Amino acid sequence: MSQSEHTADGHHIARQQEFAAHIRSPKEHPVPADVDPQRMKIYSDLFFNNVKGFLDGTFPVCAEIIGAARWHEIARDFFASHHCQTPYFLEIPQEFLQYLEQQFQPLETDPEYFYELAHYEWLELALDVSEEEIDQVFDANADLKQSIPVFAPAAQAFVYQYPVHQISTDNPAPEPHQTALIVFRDRQDQVRFIETNMMTIQLLIKLQQQELSGLAAVEQLLQESGISITEVALQGGLAILEEWQRQGLVLGGRIA
């Protein structure tokens, strides 16, 4: 590469950086020289509104709770300061979660549960677009006591410090209390949640990670929890699996 070509290439890169810097933060970076400001504004608004549209669609409750002006301010700061590691628009909401966790500077007026609420709203999208499918042959009428339960695809469990599934403009200031949720996509591809407790979440995780019959999983959980393995305790654990099947979390069972 000749010296003139190298210089021209460097100038081109510098121009691209000026262009991108202004699009990210128009107030902090001037319009590049020889670029029409009105045309530049169209580009800047187009890029920002594209990204903000994905945030609006994924985090509607967050946006309503925090108010339009503050939501716009947060979206603008995310757009300006966070360097996304993915070119896929559908992954922008996950990048926004990383921004909230690593860069976001909350105001005193921002709710303490803001990140948890955003995570819950993101989880709904993640399960909705998940390509995970059931690759196991199962019997919908199998006895869950003797068979290995098969779960709906992409079922996940999380423990929040606030009842995030109950937060709305009608309930913007809930009292903090530990809330265990199982979120899954049912047979009709609808994302649903089940409010539960730590012990049933442990049962779910155990069955997802090990090939155990319903009975074996309940017995192990009782033993590990220091609870006597009585008929009443076993029936209580198996009743949870039956309830999960009615709710669509458990699709059926494989014969162990």
Image (tube, rainbow, N blue to C red):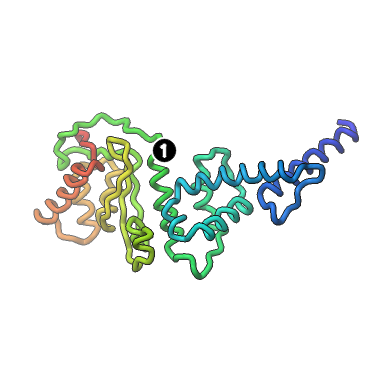
At a point 78% along the width and 42% down the height, the residue shown is 35
Q: What residue is shown at x 48% (from left), y 60% (from top)? A: 67
Task: Write down the residue under mark 1.
Answer: 129
Q: Is residue 215 visible?
A: no
Foreground: 43 or 117?
43
Q: Position of residue 156 (x, y in %)?
A: 35, 47
Residue 251 is situated, as x and y percent measured from the top left of the image, at 23, 37
Q: Quadrant of residue 225?
A: bottom left
> Furthest residue to the bottom?
108
Residue 125 picture location, percent across and down: 41, 44
Residue 102 image offset from top left, x and y in percent: 55, 58
Secondary structure under badge 1? Answer: helix
Residue 27 falls in image quadrant = bottom right
Q: Is residue 251 above or below residue 65?
A: above
Q: What kind of residue is marked 1?
A: Val
User: Which of the pair 6/113 is nearer the observer?
Assistant: 113
Q: Residue at x 41, y 38 (%)?
A: 129
Give the quadrant of the N terminus: top right
Horizontal placement of 160 versus 75: left or right? left
